[in-house]
Amino acid sequence: MHKEYLWDIYNGFISKDTGIEKRFGYDKKYSGQVASGAEILAQYEAVYDDGSSDFFVCTATKILRWNSGGSSWDTLKTHGSSATSVSIAQYGDDVVFGDGVNATQVFTKGDSATSNLTMPSGVTTFKLLLVHNNRLWGVDPDNLPHYSALGNIEDWTTAGDAGAGYIDLLLYIPKGDQIYSMQVFSKAYICFFMSNHIVTYQIGTVASDFTLLQTTVNTGVRSEHGAISFGNDLYYLDQDTPKSMAASTTSQELDLNDFSRGVFGNYYRDLMASASGERICMTKFLRRSWLVIHIPIGTGGEILIWDYVYKIWSGRWRTSDKINAIMEDKDGNLVFASTGYVYKFNPDVFTDDGDTIEFYVLTPYYYGSNGLDYERIPYVEFISQTESTGVTLEVSVFFEYESSASTYEVVSLESAGSLWDEALWDEALWDASGEDIYRVRSNGRGKMHRLSFRNNQSAKHVKIKLWQMFPKSLSLN
């Protein structure tokens, strides 16, 4: 959204027909509770070559898989030590789990439990995992990235170009820092993200082709899911701003070409800088052409929506349930892991697991044709539609920097009904269009004015498509 046209969209989004729509809510993806309500640190959906799939979650001490037949979570592994984060990667029919504390586990399709992954000599666990160019990559607790032999994720002893090895990044890691994420950039590179710099390696098929491309300083990430591959680019969330890796490899002026330019002000910079690192995450939502960014706030969080087709920020959502990890599942649903449950955003649901969603749209201040004139607005017209019944929309008009509105009216919206109910044959019109024009009479005057539209009803859908003001000059000159 552009600040010249929209100041804020709270719990809403700009739809493809340019309407501003109240966001959909979420309900439980799986009815069963995870491990007596434990925190879910990571989630992963494995889709195998034959089209079958498994959904996994990890708590501090358990790896679990959803049993669709029994409608419950099966424990695949119980660890002896507690972890604070879990990394998951898939190689064919094998799914690998590493938490940096317990022995790294591997699950093979069809099994009922995990087993210890064969590891490099002297290494007992990986804290980060990545599959790239037919190898498994793992970062050990000492921040050393290892790679398996070509085509075999449990071969860490074969030497040579097709064999296993490691990349020594210790020269690039300052004391007290660590690798927080590994991500593929533009298919041919791996970026190793630390808190304040990024080391980018070109990765070929053979080990002798592994070469350092660039070290980028004064930027980095604080969580594994704070970076995501995106076509030929890679987006990541540094200390206080979203960044583009394509921009960082061409210029140290990272904000120059970033999608965040001109949007992230002090509020979000301060919010990101103070947020809990592990819960900062983002994902692609291909069904809507969105990049979804989550910033934790207390036990809830803020979700920011970037529409990568239209290249606009199209809304912000506030959630009260805790989000620890977010992803798009194989069916194109936006899914997040929380405390005890996995939730799914559902276009047919307009509550957050039963809680009311507050929605409002706030315009910037508009000036009249002459900035010296005081104008009054006799009335405001807007087009709105809803798929629900009994819906009201609170419409407010503010002049100058008023703390309270000069005009406030609650408008009852008509639901669409059936588009094929009754026709006026002589005019070829149907009796329900799904859209209505509403008029609100306005009081007050000023040199500038703004509008607010709000709905705070449970389980109600609202879309606003257009508004128009009719100012009348009251020049004092």
Image (cartoon, rainbow, N blue to C red):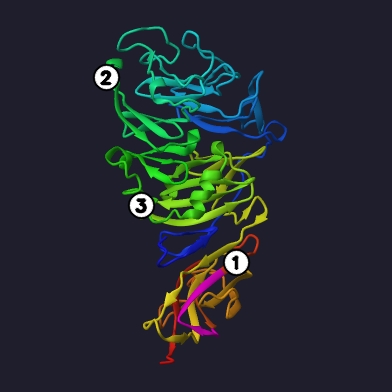
Residue 449: within the magenta? yes
Q: CA distance from mark 2 to mark 1?
A: 58 Å
Task: Tell me if residue 292 can be seen.
Answer: yes
Residue 12: within the magenta? no
Q: Residues within 10 Å of mark 3 (few under 14, many from 20)?
A: few
Residue 26 or residue 374, whichever sits in front = 374
Q: Which residue ends up furthest to the right in the rendered image?
A: 36
381 relative to 257, above or below: below
Number of numbered discs: 3
* Mark toward the start of the polypeptide (2 vs 1): 2
- Of circles 3 and 2, the one toward us is 2
- At horizontal 35% and vertical 15% (from top left) the residue drawn is 150
In the figure, residue 200 lies in which quadrant? top left
Return the residue at label 2.
Answer: 209
Q: What amino acid type should be assigned to the residue bearing mark 2?
A: Asp
Q: Secondary structure at mark 1?
A: strand
Q: Residues within 10 Å of mark 1 (few under 14, many from 20)?
A: many
Q: Residues within 10 Å of mark 2 (few under 14, many from 20)?
A: few
Return the residue at label 1.
Answer: 455
Q: What amino acid type should be assigned to the residue bearing mark 3?
A: Val
299 relative to 115, above or below: below
Return the x and y of residue 308 as percentages of the image width and height: 37, 50
Return the x and y of residue 257 as percentages of the image width and height: 31, 48
Q: Identify the magenta region.
A: 442-453
Q: CA distance from mark 3 to mark 2?
A: 35 Å
Return the x and y of residue 385 as percentages of the image width and height: 51, 69
Q: Secondary structure at mark 2?
A: helix
60 relative to 155, above or below: below
Q: What amino acid type should be assigned to the residue bearing mark 1?
A: Asn
Return the residue at label 3.
Answer: 309
- At horizontal 30% and vertical 20% (from top left) the residue drawn is 210
- Left or right of 194? Residue 112 is right
